Amino acid sequence: MALGSRTLLNIVDRAIRDLRREHPDIPDAFNRKTVAHIGRKEEAQAAGSGRGRSEQKPVPKMDRSVERIRRRGKLRVGIHPGVRGLCTLRPSTAKGLGETQAPRYEGLEPELGRRIAQLIFGDSGHVEFVATQGEQRLDATRSWMHAFFALRKSFAIFSTLLGTNWWNLGMAGKLPEFLCPRECVGTLDFVGLDYYWGVPSFWPGELHRLSAAADFQYASAPVWPNAINMILSEAARDFPGKPIIVVENGCVVRVPGFTRADYLKAHVAQVRKAVELGAPVEAYLCWSITSNREWGLTFDDGSDFGLYHVDLDTDLSLTRTPTDSSRTYATLIADSKGTSD
């Protein structure tokens, strides 16, 4: 997938829309034979007409990504074979007179790939399927340019430290109109805030830990509880009269200097300070109530934000096991009720 390619994304969207229009029962038939045989139906149609699908209206050109694919002569698509309905390999079969029908991938994934190739080349056959498993799906899209993009990512991390609350700045009327139109300013019912990590200084060690957190190495993330107090107080000044909700705040099992239970106690204490200073905080939500899967990460203590632990890899019953952090959170809730009463 070309980084930030609007044209290619438009083509993918069109292929999905066309498939859903032609096969409206796909969501209900995902695990049945209907989806598995979509590719066979389309193959038969193409063979009968002597060509691929009918001509489509051209996709608006917004960048040069598709031209680069055309010059290469084929579209490379990563697939995940072995899941019925999603992607399976039809083995070669005898056709008679010594001919055999070549192996062919069938299912939702390869069919979408062929439709995308049809929109790019006018021929659904200009596609190469690459069977990938797990993290290979990420590695397969990398090139020698990944080091450059890593450098660019680091620059983006540090530069956005200057304006991490860009959304609220726009809604408060503090951004140029081309970034936030005037009619959008102030049109919110409440102020929603996410906060996880932060650094109190720009020392290299602190910035290195923040960069690690941005690279999904959450067990190395820097913790700065005082920042949530400052953010809440700032939101109260920028949006007078608007209620504030902490939409997400949480931690993995352990980070340097903090367990998840310690993290919760420290941050809830800062939220209470903000309330005492006049911030109209209506709710605080911890992420998350149970173990979850972070995209593309191995499930372990460094990616588990759950108050209740669930062994996602081996426990088929998905048993919720209380932890120190769940008991701490229950105590914080009880204390808050007592204070409000």
Image (cartoon, grey):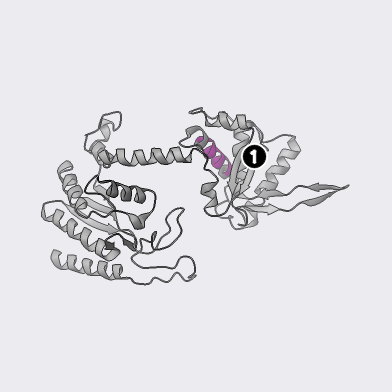
What residue range appears in magenta? 10-19
Based on the picture, tell me whether residue 157 belongs to the magenta stretch: no
Q: Can you say which quadrant of the picture contains the C terminus?
A: bottom left
Q: Nearer the viewer, residue 208 or 130?
A: 208
Going by the image, does 257 lie left or right of 58? Answer: left
The residue lying furthest to the front in this view is 204
The disc labelled 1 sits on which kind of residue?
Answer: Val
Would you identify the image quadrant in which residue 262 lies?
bottom left
- Label 1 environment density (alpha carbons within 10 Å; few <14, some 14–19, many ≥20): many
- Give residue 108's position: percent from left, percent from top: 60, 49
Vertical arrangement, residue 200 with respect to residue 266, above or below = above
Between residue 25 and residue 151, name the one nearer to us: 151
Left or right: 16 as drawn, with respect to 246: right
Give 103 or 57, whichever is nearer the viewer: 103
The location of residue 328, given as percent across then percent down, is 25, 69
Which SS does the magenta portion mostly show? helix
SS assignment at label 1: strand
Q: Residue placed at 44% from the left, 37% from the top? A: 148
User: In terms of image quadrants, where is residue 22?
Assistant: top right
Q: Is residue 158 visible to us here?
A: yes
Q: Is residue 55 above or below residue 134?
A: above
Residue 11: say if magenta.
Answer: yes
Q: Dot 1 corresponds to which residue?
A: 127
Measuring from the top left, give residue 32's x and y in whole percent. Answer: 62, 57
- Residue at x-position 34% and y-position 55%: 220
Look at the image and tell me whether residue 22 can be seen.
no
In the image, 42: left or right of 20?
right
- The residue lying furthest to the left in this view is 277
